[in-house]
Every structure is written in structure tokens, then in C-alpha cells.
Amino acid sequence: MFHIGAPRTTAGGFVRTVELIFNVAVRDIRKAHGNAIIGLLISIVQSVTMVLFFWLMFTLLNMRGTAVRGDFMLYSMSGIFMYMTHIKAISAVAKAEGPTSAMMKHAPMNTIVAIGGQALATLYQQVLAIFVILFFYHTCFNEITIHQPVAAMGMILMAWFSGIAIGMIFKAATPWSPSFFGIVTSVYTRINVLASGKMFLANATPTWLLSWFWWNPLFHIIDQQRGFVFLNYNPHYSSLWYPVWVSCGLLVLGLMADTFTNKYASASWSAGR
């Protein structure tokens, strides 16, 4: 996994860093579950469970008429896939190994590599789970058509990237008060069950209610995603660039805060807790 000797060029250093991130991602996937197939099945079951719950709730409450015209299951999955990718990226980055980890004793290893590896492992699992679920549904139940598949894939990456940016904030803050910020992270993911907007269409929501969700980058990502997935839906109350700029800003702040935290990090921090 690690190689002795410093790279002689900038390109060599970049290639070695990418290789390290890939190896850390593989290690993280294997650490989560010894069998890669079982690990993938767990991700699939989590997403399918949320889709079925979403479908059952809308059916019992007779709310399917509020969804976008088109395949209702695809409408459900378009929101849930974004939500799952986002919160899993947050969790992975927030729990990434810090400067006091035993892995950091290896010279080439650093926190950026650890964060990149964790994030890449999450993206791999989620994208693979999404493609497996969509293929199974398309083959066994109902043929689906995605209006702009490349743009829709881009929004999956945007949900992942925004999760990394927010996860960096939580990662930098957690060492100062692990219990409190652990609760804050959990509360944020729970709030996004509703605040993400995956259960309703922004175009069909009253303006006074939209103000409660407009702050959330994931709300914009999900609404824009549905515009790319469905031919007859055009988002009017969300922005494509808002989550981009917010995520970039949070990522910069998170990196700065994490650098500051690492200066004071100590293995004895949690001794008195």
C-alpha cells in the first residue's frame, strides 16, 4: 500500500496520492464488510427500504397525485438516491481517520488521503447500488427513460460533493466535543428526511413553505435532479448553482477548520471524557 521514497515530480506526487486514496477506499470497503457482495447488498437494501416506505406512505395517504407526471417509483428513487448519497458522504467524511489514528503513523498517509478514501468508497457503493436497483426495476417491473442521464449522474456527484463539504465541517468540529457534534450530525441527517424535499415537488409547494427549505443545498439538488430525469418537469424554485457555491465555500471552511484542529489534536483529548 505504501511506497518508500519521495516523488521527484509534481505529477509523480499526484499519481501517488491518487493511488493512496484508491487503496484507502478499498480498505474502507473491506473493513465495512469482509464480503464485498454483502456490503453492496446492504446498501441496496437500505435504499430499497426507503423507496418502499416512500411508496407505502404516498399510497396510504392518497398523495400520489402530487408527484410529477411519469413513473412514480422513479420519482421516489430520484429523491431517495440523492438523500442516501448525501448523508452517507457526510457520515463517511465526518468519521474519517484523524491525525491521532494509527494509520497516520505511516509516512505517506495524511488526513486528506483518509478523507478522500472514505468518500471514494461511499461513492462507489452508492453508484453501484443505484445502477443495480435501476437495472432490476427496468428489467423486471417497468421500463424507465431518463431524460438527461449525463446531467442526472452529475447531480448524484453533486449530492456526494455537498456531503463531503458538510462532512468536513462536522469532522473539524467533532474532536472538540465528540458527544455534542455527534448528536448534531445525527440531527442534521434526520432533519434532511423532510428538509431535503424528496417527498414533494418544489413547483407544487406554496412559496411561504419553500422558504423553510431553500437554504438546503440538497433541496436544490433533488429538485434539479428531477428536472433532468423527467421530460415534463422544469424546476422553477431551485437553483443549479446554489449548491455548487455553498458546497465549495463549506469545503474551504472545513479544510481550514480541520487544519486548525489537527494542530491541537492529541491522543489524550478523550481521556477525560
Image: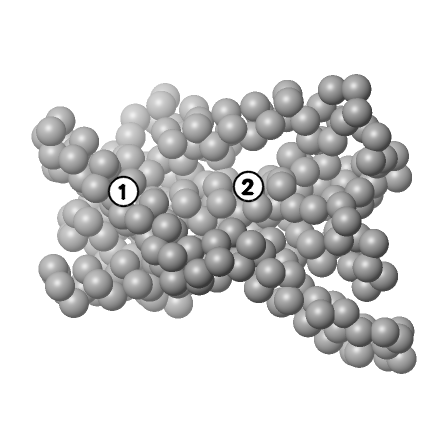
Crowding at dot 1, Cα within 10 Å, few <14 / some 14-19 / many 20+, comes out as few
Horizontally, is 123 left or right of 256 in the view?
Answer: left
Q: Which residue is under mark 1?
A: 49
Identity of the amino acid at label 1?
A: Thr
The amino acid type found where label 2 is placed reads Ser
Residue appearing at x 13%, y 63% in the figure: 140
Residue for point 82% across, 35% down? 267
Residue 11: x and y in percent read 79, 78
Q: Is residue 138 above or below residue 262?
A: below
The N terminus appears in which quarter of the rendering? bottom right
Q: Which residue is drawn at 16% across and 52% down?
A: 70
SS label for mark 1: helix
Q: Where is residue 239 in the image (x, y as percent from the top left)?
A: 46, 45
Which residue does the image show at 76% across and 46% down from the upper left?
A: 101
Q: Name the residue under label 2.
A: 91
Q: Is residue 267 above or below residue 15?
A: above
Q: Is mark 2 on a helix, strand or loop?
A: helix
Q: Position of residue 12 (x, y in %)?
A: 80, 78
Q: Can residue 200 be seen in this view?
A: yes
Q: In this view, does 58 lie to the left or right of 79?
A: left
Say whether residue 157 is visible: no
Nearer-N-terminus badge (1/2): 1
Residue closest to the eye, 101 or 227: 101
Between 107 and 153, the one lying in front of the other is: 107
Q: Position of residue 258 (x, y in %)?
A: 77, 41
- Disc 2 crowd rating (10 Å Cα; few below 14, some 14-19, many 20+) is many
Asked if residue 233 lies left or right of residue 197, the reply is left
Cα distance between the residues tagged 1 and 2: 19 Å
Coloration of the structure image:
one colour
Q: Quadrant of residue 191?
A: top left
| CB contact under 8 Å: marks 1 and 2 | no
Q: Which quadrant is home to the C terminus?
A: top right
